[in-house]
Amino acid sequence: MKRYLIDVYIADDHQLVVEGLSELINQSGQAHVSRSFNTLEACRQTLQERRPDVLLLDISMPDGDGAAFCHEVVVEYPKVKVVAVTIHDEYSMILRLMECGAHGYVLKSSPGKDLIEAITTVWQGGRYVSPLVEAILREGRASHVVLTEVENNILHHLCQGLTNPQIAAQVHLSLETVNWYRKRLLIKYGVRNTVSLVRLALERKLVL
């Protein structure tokens, strides 16, 4: 009998989803679905007796909060890797699951290869978010950035195409101080250079 490397459980109350995910995973040759559950309680009871390598967890379950259950699992069974597999693409929900200890986050609309990559990545000790989720996180981080009045003013001037010396003259600060604020803006928005910062600010209408 063939022994699969990665043992997977699925907690999802939609049978068609479970069947589709199971077929995809079993055909990958890298993992195998040994159990599935349509309630959190059923999953909880089984985890007390036997634990998988990876648990694929839907957030919206009929008998409880998937995020809270995720936290429960990672605390009680630290060797079990939890990957959220869900339709929820809200920045706040993704952030909450990651804060609850989820090792991975994949949208149900993602390609199948993303799910297989998530399973193998977390099993090997890494963390994984699908490209779609990463894009949401990037946008969410940018939209949640809080700027001081000076930072907002400097960003406005950068978007107008002014150089650092020109900005320094406009805002009555030293060139060194303006350069320091510019670097802070790059860090806050998670971009590498001023060109990327300006492009992001204009695309998302961060300045008027």
Image (cartoon, helix red, strand yellow):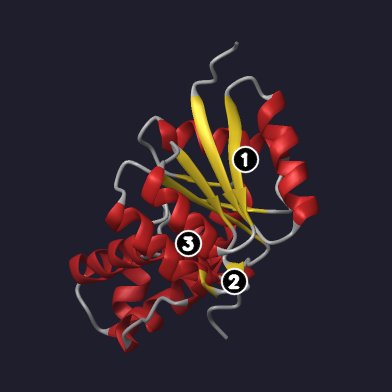
Q: Amino acid at mark 1?
A: Leu
Assign a secondary structure to mark 1: helix
Could you tell me which residue is drawn at 63 percent across and 66 percent down? 89
Instruction: Say which of 20 and 191 sits in front.
Output: 20
Q: Which dot, 3 or 1, sits closer to the camera? A: 1
The image shows residue 132 at horizontal and vertical percentages of 63, 53
The image shows residue 117 at horizontal and vertical percentages of 57, 33
Structural crowding at the residue carrying mark 2, measured as other residues with C-alpha within 10 Å and reported as few (<14), some (14–19) or many (≥20) = few
Which residue, given by chain and number where applicable, does mark 1 sit on? 115
Query: Is tag 3's residue or tag 1's residue first in the polypeptide sequence?
Result: 1
Could you tell me which residue is drawn at 39 percent across and 82 percent down? 152
Which residue, given by chain and number where applicable, does mark 2 sit on? 90
Assign a secondary structure to mark 3: helix
Query: Is tag 1's residue or tag 2's residue first in the polypeptide sequence?
Result: 2
In this figure, what is the number of numbered marks?
Answer: 3
Question: Seen from this angle, which residue lies furthest right?
Answer: 16
Instruction: Say which of 37 and 129 sits in front.
Output: 37
Quarter holding the N terminus? top right
Q: Using the rendered view, name the quadrant where residue 113 is placed.
A: top right
For marks 1 and 2, give the CA distance: 19 Å
The image shows residue 175 at horizontal and vertical percentages of 23, 68
Work out whether 153 lies above or below 118: below
Structural crowding at the residue carrying mark 3, measured as other residues with C-alpha within 10 Å and reported as few (<14), some (14–19) or many (≥20) = many
